[in-house]
Structure formats: structure tokens, C-alpha cells
Amino acid sequence: MKQLTLIFILAFSLVPLKRIVAQTTTSTSSARLSHIAVYVTDLKKSTDFYRQILNLQEIEEPFKDGKHTWFSLGAAGQLHLIKGAVKILEHDKNQHLCFSVAAIPDFIKILDAQKVDYSNWPGTAKAPTVRVDGVKQVYFQDPDGQWLEVNDAK
């Protein structure tokens, strides 16, 4: 009888502890990136740019209205180009999209072949930045003036 009473006391004393743990543990996972939308003036020009310069793979988009191009960004999500911007705006370099490649020298050859101007962070033309961690990076703009960074971070 003492053992049965001890079991009941022990069992009921753990119930409040279970409630406390349940209330402090979150059951939701963190948000993940779905897509990045970039508003563009000339959809064909921007689509060609992202396809040729960054070698992004176009994916099916559901609207089929001639105003959208969607690209896969792998596990990171998608890039959506949306036609309709009225004019090209000036953008600050601090606000940029960043992509990684295997080797900056090989990527620079693509930029040079496509006659795309690029610079390092301070703005020196045709020169990569080398960060303190050794990562090399270049900056350039898409046809609508959006800043892009490409680096060789692993």
C-alpha cells in the first residue's frame, strides 16, 4: 500500500513539471526564406542577365502572364523577377543580393566577357575585395541598378 501511495504521489508531482516544460518549449520552427522578389523595368533584359551572368536555372512560374520570371536558388529558395518598375532607381551597395561561386577569377572572366562593370567594396574597378577571413568578393549591378555581390565563401 505504501508503494502504491508513493507511486501516485510521484506521478502527480510530475504533472506540473510537465506543464512547465511544455509551456517553455516552442513547437514552431524558425522561418525559412521562400523567395526574393526583384521589381524590374525590362523583364527580358533582366532574365537574360541573371541567366547568363549567374547561370541561374529558370523554373516554372504559375502566372504565365509574361510579367514574371522565376529562378531556383536551390535550398535557399527562389528569385522572382517581376516586370513593372517604371524607372531605374539608385540603390545603396549595402542593400544587395549575394551569391557564392567556386572561384572568383573564373567568375570575373564571365563578367569581363559580358562587359559587366565590377569593383571591390570601396569601388576600385576590376578589383576584388579580400575580406579578413580570406573570402574574395566583387560587386556589380543588374540592369535595374540592384547591387549584387558574388564571393567565393564555402
Image (spheres, rainbow, N blue to C red):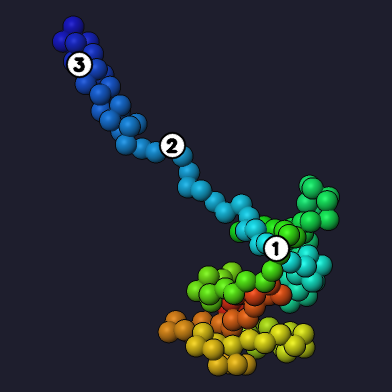
Which class describes the residues within 10 Å of circle 3: few (<14), some (14-19), or many (20+)?
A: few
Give how far across and how far down residue 34 sits, in percent: 61, 52
Which residue is nearer to you in this view: 56 or 38?
38
Give how far across and how far down residue 4 sits, in percent: 22, 10
Q: Nearer the viewer, mark 1 or mark 2?
A: 1
Number of marks present in the image shown: 3
Which residue is nearer to you in this view: 31 or 74?
31
* Amino acid bearing label 1: Ala
> Does residue 109 sit above or below 67 in this rendering?
below
- Residue occupying image coordinates x 67% and y 71%: 88
* Amino acid bearing label 2: Ser
As drawn, which residue projects farthest toward the left? 2
- Residue occupying image coordinates x 23% and y 13%: 8
Indicate left or right for 32 with 117 as reference: left
Image marks 1 and 3: residues in contact by CB distance under 8 Å: no
Which circle's residue, 1 or 2, is located before the other in the chain?
Answer: 2
Q: Which residue is mark 1?
A: 85
Which circle's residue, 2 or 3, is located before the other in the chain?
Answer: 3
Q: Secondary structure at mark 2?
A: loop
Indicate left or right for 14 with 100 as reference: left
Q: Which residue is mark 3?
A: 9
- Residue occupying image coordinates x 78% and y 65%: 43
Which circle's residue, 1 or 3, is located before the other in the chain?
Answer: 3
Give how far across and how far down residue 44 sits, in percent: 82, 67
